Structures are given as structure tokens and as C-alpha cells.
Amino acid sequence: MTFPVGIVGFSGYSGAEALRILKRHPHFDPVLLTHRADAGEGARLVRKPAIRQASASAASVSSEGLKAVLLATAAEVSMDLAPGYLEAGAIVVDLSGAFRLRTPECYKRWYKEDHAAPALFEQAVYSIPEFHREQVRGARLVSNPGCYPTAANLAIRPLIEAGVVDRGAGIVCDAKSGVSGAGRKPSLKTSFCEAGSNFSAYSVLNHRHVPEVLQTSGVEEREFSFTAQLIPIDRGILETIYFRAARPLSAAAIIDIYKKSYGDEPFVRLYEAGHLPDLHAVQGTNFCDIGAIADEVTGRCVVVSAIDNVIKGAAGQAIQNLNLAAGIEETAGLI
């Protein structure tokens, strides 16, 4: 049996990736929900014009019988559309930052704007499936994590829970992302002449993805230094995470910690001690690859976490969450 699933924002990078996955999904049929610019130039990204289309209105979601809607939109658009879709009976998986934080006050601090739908915070379930699988089963409003926090939390949280990090020494997360992470909307910073053959840091000390790491891994803001950097490739995130061990710790011991956390996880791949992933290994996949190196004498430890920012960092993880919320096999359409 298959169910219709709408996509708002299908002309953007994450929305187009979600469409690609849904077209091969065994249980979902994609429906393009046209909203603002989607009906114009962006529609050229869709290779099969015969794919079903409908208006992005709540009435249309109801009349089309959509089981779920993926919102690959800006936060303000998600806040505007999500309440109507929920009332229409659809599961909503939001790929924006609209519902990722726990309170309107926290949202305003990091996003610099008032939240337009604060009543939905109580209903929203933030889900990195590897950590929140049980909470998202049967959820109606799922908040998909940011791309940087996905890679960071999968690397950091097991170490914090194992108590092996010298938290007084802090954790440094040096994160590099391809240009697609900025979205498809043109800007000077992501234009060819600015981004090509260049390497730049941005949103230093105030990146809006930081609170997702704090609330998921349980670290304090004073313990965590995060810097996002733009590299001249189209997709992929590689995060190099530095910390001091609280006690003598080998790379093999770090990998053993991850094995206990992720031994049965379908989308986390671990490298042998002393070996590290690169972006080629994860591009085009829903995997997060993790490797570690450690110096037992000095206590210096380095973990590298790599994902495809458009898939595991956005569309793929959204469908992983949708699978769970809809009560079907988590890996459906993704492997």
C-alpha cells in the first residue's frame, strides 16, 4: 500500500532531494505542493512533469488525502503552514529551524525573531532518529534537525554519556560544509566568484545550530566552541571535533563507546581506530561516518564525523523520521 506525501519547497536543494527519494519509496507517492516561487522557475528541477501537483493550502492537503507533508521551507513559511496541515490531519515533518528549539525565548535568542506559532512547541518532536526513535513514533509534528547538529551530536553525545570528556577543557567543533547548505536562493556569499577557490568562516560564536547541540548532547554553552566554514564544493559536511580525555583513552576505546551506542544502527558507520572518514564516503547517502584518533599520553582526542548535508543532514533524515512517524520500516526508501 502506498500513501500520498506532499512536498512544499520542492524546487530547493533539500526539497528536490526529498522528491528523488520519495519517487523510489515503496510506501509513499510524492505530491508537489506549489507555494510561491515553486510554481515558477524552480519547477524546472522536477524531471517528470507528470508528478501529481496541488496547491499548498490546508484545504488542498485535506482534499488530496495527504498522509504527510514535508516542509522544505524557510522557518517563517513552516510556521505559517504547519498549523493548517496538522488540522487537516497530516503528519508534518519540518526541515526548517522553526520548531527545533524548546521555547519561543530560545528561538528568539538564536534566530533573532519572534516565533509566529509558539503553541506548537508542546506538540513538536525534535528527532535525530538514533536518539529520539521512540518519541517520534506516532508523532504528528516532527522537527528535523539541522545538518551541522546531526553530525556533531552523533559524534559528541555518546562521549558525554560515557563520561570520557574532560569538560573543563572544552570541546571544539570545526565544521566545514558545501555551498548547498546555504540553500538555493542566490546570494553574494554563495556566488561562484565568492565561493569558488575560497574557504571562509561564518556566524562565528552565534551560529543558530549551536543550541541543538547543547540540548541534545547535554553540554553547556561555555564548554562548546563551534565554527562553521564554507568550502567550495556542492555538498557534504565534515566536522573535526577536538577534546581532552578525562582519563587515559585510546582510539579503540572511543570506537568501542560508539559501538555500544550504534552497533545496530542502520545509518551510522564506524571506522577502525586510527582511520577517519572523508566526504566521498558519504556523499549521496543517508549515512553518518565516524572515526577517531587519540594520544593516550597527552589526552588529546580527535573525532571526525561526516555526512551528506542534503541527505542525512536534511531530506534523507526527514524521510527516516517520516517512516518512523508513519509506523513503517525506518530504512524504507533510503537503502
Image (cartoon, rainbow, N blue to C red):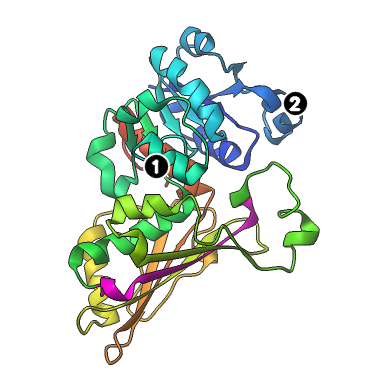
Q: In screen coordinates, is 250 left or right of 75?
A: left
- What's the residue at 60%, 37% (across, down)? 16
Up/down of 87 relative to 6, above or below? above
How many numbered discs sit on the rendered protein? Answer: 2
Please check the rendered image and state whether residue 37 is part of the magenta-colored stretch, yes or no.
no
- Disc 1: which residue: 106
Residues at badges 2 and 1 in contact (C-beta under 8 Å)? Answer: no
Element type at mark 1: helix
- What's the residue at 51%, 38% (across, down)? 21
Which of marks 1 and 2 precedes in the sequence?
2
Q: Position of residue 101 (x, y in %)?
A: 38, 41
Neighbour tally class for label 1: few under 14, some 14-19, many 20 plus, Cα within 10 Å: some
Q: Position of residue 195 (x, y in %)?
A: 72, 61
User: Looking at this rendering, what residue extends furthest in the right direction?
Assistant: 193
Query: What's under tag 1, amino acid-wise?
Result: Cys
Q: Is residue 5 visible?
A: no
Neighbour tally class for label 2: few under 14, some 14-19, many 20 plus, Cα within 10 Å: few
- What's the residue at 49%, 14% (across, down)? 61
Please check the rendered image and state whether residue 169 is part of the magenta-colored stretch, yes or no.
yes
Q: Nearer the viewer, residue 112 or 262?
A: 112
* Span colored in magenta: 165-180
Element type at mark 2: loop
Q: Quadrant of residue 88?
A: top left
Q: In screen coordinates, is 312 left or right of 273?
A: right
Q: Position of residue 128 (x, y in %)?
A: 34, 46
Query: What's under tag 2, amino acid-wise?
Result: Gly
Up/down of 125 relative to 84, above or below? below
Q: Is residue 330 visible?
A: yes
Alpha carbon distance from label 2 to label 1: 35 Å
- Disc 2: which residue: 40
Up/down of 224 relative to 235, above or below? below
